[in-house]
Every structure is written in structure tokens, then in C-alpha cells.
Image (cartoon, grey):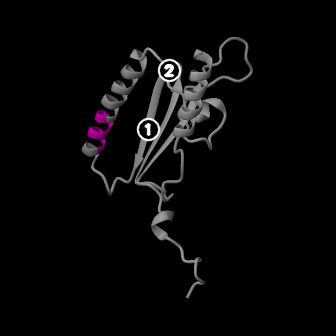
Amino acid sequence: MAPEGMALDLEAHQLSAVGFNYMGQMHQVTGNESIVLADLSLGEEINPDFERPHKLDFFTVVSQGVLEGKIYYNLHQYEQATIKQLVNTYKTKLSTIITHCMNKETSDFTPADYGNSQLTLEELDSITSALNKKFKK
């Protein structure tokens, strides 16, 4: 029996069913650069026997101004038609979010925008409110 306080909460250690990985922006190098991106396939990206930590893994990257993505899933767990429906819904919802963001007249900020990932949104709102009151006088 484990000492008091040492028992593991297994539910807290389970991974989520869906993983999202944004790889950033990749720019095509042009001119007389020594490194350029090739248009060749790299083949298998991972060992086919690799056991994924998530049931679905979304990988996205922006390349030449276009968002590209891949979804990895277990072929024995999901039907291709289900994944196609998921992709179509994902595209629709993402387009809705992009349209919303592009039509906003003001910007929203998070603690990470100020280099502080430990600050909560509520704390940031409190600080912002206090600063707005001070500088509007």
C-alpha cells in the first residue's frame, strides 16, 4: 500500500484524446541562399508501429501563406468517411473563427502577449482595468 498522499490519480495522468501541434511558419527560401526547401516527399514520417499518445493528432504548418495540415489516426479505430467529415467540420469552424478575428475592431490580449504565461486572464483584466482608470484621468 502506498503511503498517504502518494497514491497516483490515474485519471489526471491520462492524455487527451486529441493532440494539436502547430509547427509554425515555413518560408520558401529564394535567391542565392544555401538552404532551400525541396518539393520532394520525405516518405514515412514515423515508424508505422509507433503507438500514438492521442487517438487523433492534428499537425499544421503555414507554408507560403497557406495553412496546411495532416490528421493522424488509427485506421482500425476510425472510418475514412468519419475523418473526412471531421476535416470538413474543422475547416468550416476554423473559417468562422478566422472571419470573426478579421472583423474585430479591437485586439484581445493574453498574458503570453506580455511575456507572462503564469498570469491568469482575470489578473490581466484587473491590471488592464486599473491602468485604464489611471491613464484616463
Quadrant in the picture for residue 100: top left
Q: Indicate the amino acid at tag 1.
A: Lys
Read off the residue under disc 2.
107
Q: Nearer the viewer, mark 2 or mark 1?
A: 2
Question: At numbered mark 2, what does the secondary structure look like: helix, strand or loop?
Answer: loop
Q: Residue at coordinates 57% horizontally, 22% vertically from top-left?
A: 133
Query: Residue at horizontal 58%, vertical 15%?
Result: 136
Q: Residue furthest front?
A: 137
Q: Residues within 10 Å of mark 2 (few under 14, many from 20)?
A: few
Name the residue beneath numbered marker 1: 70
Which residue in the rendered view is the most extreme toward the top? 31
Task: Specify the segment rendered in magenta.
Answer: 83-89
Q: Of residues 99 and 127, which is closer to you in this image?
A: 127
**Residue found 64% across the figure and 30% down from its top:** 114
Between 72 and 19, the one nearer to me in the picture? 19
Q: Earlier in the sequence, mark 2 or mark 1?
A: 1
Residue 10 in the image, given as x and y percentages of width and height: 48, 70
Residue 123 location in percent, x, y?
A: 57, 39
Q: How many other residues sit within 10 Å of disc 1, few (<14), some (14-19) or many (≥20)?
A: few
Residue 66 percent across, percent down from the top left: 47, 22
Does residue 64 sit above or below 77 in this rendering?
Answer: above
Which amino acid is tagged 2?
Ser
Q: What secondary structure predominates along the stretch shown in magenta?
A: helix
Relative side of 19 to 90, left or right: right
Q: Secondary structure at mark 1?
A: strand
35 above or below 19? above
At horizontal 51% and vertical 19% (from top left) the residue drawn is 65
Q: Which part of the image, by quadrant, shows the N terminus? A: bottom right
In the rendered image, which quarter is residue 55 located in? bottom left
Indicate whether residue 128 is drawn in magenta: no
- Residue nearest the viewer, comparing 13 with 25: 13
Residue 18 drawn at (x, y percent):
42, 49
